[in-house]
Amino acid sequence: KRIVVLISGSGTNLQAIINACKNQYINGNVVGVLSNKADVFGLTRAENADIATCVLSHKEFDTRDAYDIQLLKEIDAFEPDLVILAGFMRILTAEFVQHFQGRLLNIHPSLLPKYQGLNTHQRAIDAGDKEHGVSVHFVTEELDGGPVILQAKVPVFAGDNADDLAARVHEQEHRIYPLVVKWFCEQRLTMSEECAKLDNQAL
Ligand code: GRF
């Protein structure tokens, strides 16, 4: 299977997936990495693994629509079976999401449907939650919505700050994202229309 990964940052999840492909845990290959930011370490990780990269800066586009149309074209050029968001810090248009529906995954650092959006670790601490975690889900038009495939939980300890908690969650991210990608590549996961609709209604 051909996998394309979208990033905006350091790319530790990207690295976990590259490693899992390399050691054949995942029956697939990362064929391209796209970033909306130049000079992020994730691009270096891709280059080190001899993976094609593409930087498409959102600053060069007047509208979100125009950016996403170009992004879609750049991704399609890699002919992906699966597109994964790994710290890609952009809201995607409905047209983009529909184009890749059923083969577009995201990882979000909370136990969805809790804490959609940003600053999830601090929000879990502020709420006094005893547990927190991470979710891998199919992407639909709802931001951080879409059917959840797999979650991992971590404890929240007294005195944790957001960085402590983020580090604990990250460890789990690097376990569950490769696992879900593995399942997808083995054709064990599909998103039915019905499932996507039900999920949107629930939100
Ligand atoms: C992760 O925390 C992920 O859950 C979120 O963005 C972060 C990406 O981290 N969506 P990295 O670039 O993979 O290290």
Image (spheres, grey):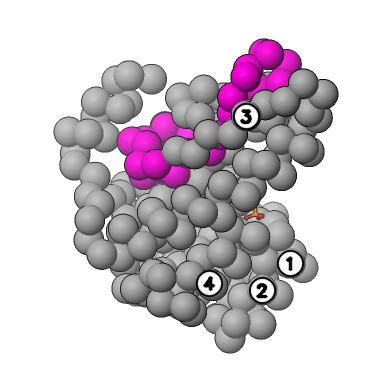
Q: Which residue is mark 4?
A: 18
Q: Is residue 151 above or below residue 177?
A: above
- What span is in magenta? 124-150
Label 4 C-beta lies within 8 Å of the nearest ligand 1 atom:
no
Q: Which residue is mark 1?
A: 41
Disc number placed over residue 155 in the picture, else none: 3
What separation in Å lies between label 3 and label 1 (alpha carbons)? 29 Å
Q: Are marks 4 and 2 in contact (CB under 8 Å)?
A: yes
Q: Are marks 1 and 2 in contact (CB under 8 Å)?
A: yes
Amino acid type, residue under disc 3 in the picture: Pro
What separation in Å lies between label 1 and label 4 (alpha carbons)? 14 Å
How far across and how far down the image is residue 31, in percent? Answer: 46, 77
Residue visible at 82% across and 24% down in the picture = 159
Residue 20 at least partly seen: yes
Q: Which residue is mark 2?
A: 45
Q: Please name which of the two marks, 3 or 4, marks the residue nearer to the observer.
A: 3
Disc number placed over residue 103 in the picture, else none: none
Amino acid type, residue under disc 2 in the picture: Arg
Magenta span contains residue 186 = no
